[in-house]
Amino acid sequence: MEHITKALKRMKDNNWDFMYLAIDVHGTMIKPTHHNDNKFEFYSNAEKTLQYISTREDIVMIMYTSSYPEYIDKLMEFLVDHDIYFDYVNENLNVESDHVCDFSDKFYYDALLDDKAGFNPDTDWTKLMNILQSNNNE
């Protein structure tokens, strides 16, 4: 979770308004069923942590998923019913390409939560909550 601490420090040091947090769906926040069945079960502490992040005005949440649009629509309904609000899905319209970076094919984020990138959903949601609460910029 060192990458989260570094992203928060970078935000503070650079006086940025936001940290952009890309969050994978299956195997990270929702337990995979390996079917397109619209059954959603959070990992332990994922719901509580995502609800907390949703209240932070300094964190932009980006859903990072390869799911089909119909599935994403159902998932978003489920998340809203649980007071979890993503700002974007597979894009970040807040950060545009410039003379240094081209974001036309890859959107910008400060930190990624993804089981394939080392995030352990059984333990890291609690660690993430602790880091975010101890680094509350509001």
Image: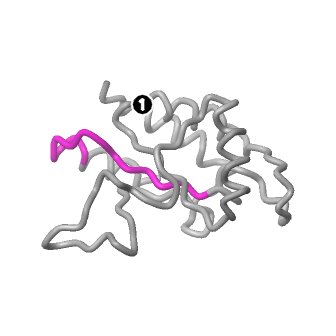
Q: Name which residue lies at 13% across and 72% down.
A: 99
Residue 47 pos. (x, y %): 66, 36
Q: In the displayed structure, does residue 35 sit left or right of residue 52?
A: right
Q: Quadrant of the C terminus?
A: top left
Query: Does 92 appear in magenta?
Result: no
Q: In the displayed structure, does residue 103 sit left or right of residue 124?
A: left
Q: Is mark 1 on a helix, strand or loop?
A: loop
Q: In the displayed structure, does residue 100 sit left or right of residue 138?
A: left
Q: Name which residue lies at 21% across and 43% down.
A: 16
The residue range painted magenta reads 11-24
The residue most toward the front is: 70
Q: In the displayed structure, does residue 130 sit left or right of residue 109?
A: right
Q: Name which residue lies at 38% across and 65% down.
A: 107
- Out of 84 and 72, give the one closest to the viewer: 72
Residue 125: name its quadrant. Answer: top right
- Out of 97 and 108, give the one closest to the viewer: 97
Which residue in the protein does label 1 denote?
56
Answer few, some or many: residues within 10 Å of disc 1's Cα (few below 14, many 20 plus, some between 14 and 19).
some
